[in-house]
Image (cartoon, helix red, strand yellow):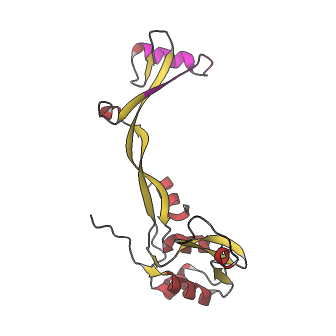
Amino acid sequence: MNVDYGKTLDSTIIERGLRSLNPDLHFDLAAAIGQVHPYIMDRQGVYYKGKHICAMDRGPVPEYKIWDVKKTQVPVQWAEADKDDVSIRYHVIPPTHPHYADLYEIARQGKHNELCILSTGKLVRTQCFGYRPWKNRVIRCGWRHTFERLLAAQIPGITRESLGRMFGVDMYKFPVGPPDEVIEAIWAE
């Protein structure tokens, strides 16, 4: 599978370009003062007048984020309930629940697949969980993330226009998708 990570920029070119837009920007302060963090080999900090603004990748920086993926249990549809890696869990809804009477009636009438009444008379909500690939953590931030964070910090000399000219990129291109994915594409480190 060919994955397109967009236009790649080298971190030294990004540093040099950003410093020319604002000489008060500096990089990798943690390493310079002997602080070690878990991702120091892959990332560095971007600082403005000593204040940490965001993380930036080291070496070749992809345009977009790259996520580590791991298999984890997540909610799945009932249509997958009979698969080998799917389990069904339930939790008891206590009579003190504000909508207990309504939920009990819905379960009694069989109007909702996830609500049922056990032989003991307890009302339960059931849900299917299966092991699926899931985003774990960001392993590469991407230069769009770094630039968007710098823009949000309103650093003098850093504008969409100045970044576009300096690096030959379209800074008006914006991630698309549901709101949670757009936020994740820009802010997650």
Q: Range of the magenta residues?
A: 89-108
Q: Position of residue 29 (x, y in %)?
A: 67, 77
Question: Is residue 90 found inside the magenta-colored segment of the image?
Answer: yes
Q: Residue at x 59, y 16 (%)?
A: 95
Query: 74 left or right of 102?
Result: left
Q: Residue at x 63, y 18 (%)?
A: 96
Residue 106 higher or lower than 39, as above or below: above
Q: Which of the 4 image quadrants contains residue 62?
A: bottom left
Which residue appears farthest toward the right when viewing the image? 50
Report whether residue 17 is seen: yes
Q: Nearer the viewer, residue 110 or 49?
A: 49
Q: Residue at x 29, y 30 (%)?
A: 82
Quadrant where the N terminus sits is: bottom left
Q: Residue at x 52, y 85 (%)?
A: 12
Question: Is residue 143 found inside the magenta-colored segment of the image?
Answer: no
Q: Which of the 4 image quadrants contains residue 111?
A: top left
Quadrant where the C terminus sits is: bottom right
Q: Nearer the viewer, residue 148 or 160?
A: 148
Which residue appears farthest toward the top when viewing the image? 120
Query: 53 left or right of 80?
Result: right
Report whether residue 176 is seen: no
Query: 156 left or right of 81?
Result: right
Which residue appears farthest toward the left when viewing the image? 1
Number of numbered callouts drawn: 0
Q: Position of residue 91 (x, y in %)?
A: 51, 24
Q: Position of residue 118 (x, y in %)?
A: 45, 13
Query: 189 left or right of 83?
Result: right
Q: Nearer the viewer, residue 169 or 67?
A: 67
